[in-house]
Amino acid sequence: QLAGAALFDFVSSSVRRRVAEAGGELVPFAPPAAESVGVDAVVVMVGLNDFKKILRGSTSPGIFRTDIESFLRDMREQVGPECMVVFPGLPCEVMMLPEPLKTVATHVAGFYDEEKRRMAAHQALVHFIPKPAFEMWTRAAERYGEVVAQDGVHPNEIGYKVFAEYVGGELARIWKEQAEKVREGR
């Protein structure tokens, strides 16, 4: 619970700052009563662990699509139909896996990212955020040091911070575009 709360505080402060930088409005956070909790957006990282399912022969792009659609339905019951759902692309190029495993994982992640992109194109309030450019990770590593955890796959604390900043900026851009459409009557 403490780790989850810390991650929420970190990500929410990063998103609030990015929204403000994009011209949005900062609203002080006061936890509402449990029955009136509204969720503006949910960021869903999915696909990387499905790679293991491929190796076991227990998934395919079709099964992945069905699983994500089922997950979205279940999540909408929890967060409501007006909640934006964001699926970021998986930045596998930064992983420290041996070749050819790294190349295979990157290509598989690309297939999963394409499924997420297709889903976002056909569902309201679902967005796909492309993975950040590899150069972003290179600059972050030059500035902060290592960005990948010891497992060689997942981001470390710095890597998650860098990724949260990127996703927060993209989320702010999406909200700004939506606000402009509303103002223009589109």
Image (tube, rainbow, N blue to C red):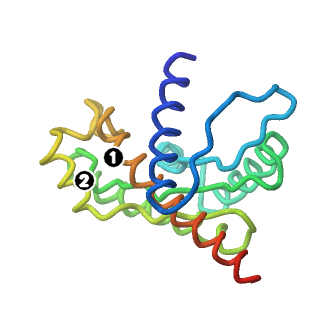
The residue carrying mark 2 is: 137
Task: Judge by depth and name the residue closer to the eye, 24 or 171.
Answer: 24
**Is 64 situated above or below 31?**
below
| In this rendering, position of residue 116 left or right of residue 67 | left
Type of the residue with mark 2: Trp
Q: Residue furthest top?
A: 2
Q: Label 2, secondary structure: give it.
A: helix
| In this rendering, position of residue 123 left or right of residue 95 | right
Which residue is found at the position 85% from the left and 44% from the top?
A: 77
Type of the residue with mark 1: Val
Which residue is found at the position 30% from the left and 32% from the top?
A: 151
**Can you tell which mark lies on residue 162?**
1
Q: Quadrant of the C terminus?
A: bottom right
**Is 21 situated above or below 185?**
above
Which residue is found at the position 54% from the left and 25% from the top?
A: 4
Image coordinates for residue 158, horizontal then vertical, percent: 29, 37
Image coordinates for residue 167, horizontal then vertical, percent: 46, 54
Disc 1 vs disc 2: Cβ atoms closer than 8 Å? yes
Q: Label 1, secondary structure: give it.
A: helix
Sequence-wise, the earlier of marks 1 and 2 is: 2
Task: Judge by depth and name the residue closer to the eye, 52 or 77.
Answer: 77
Between marks 1 and 2, how big is the CA–CA gap? 8 Å
Q: Quadrant of residue 32?
A: top right
Q: Quadrant of the N terminus?
A: top right
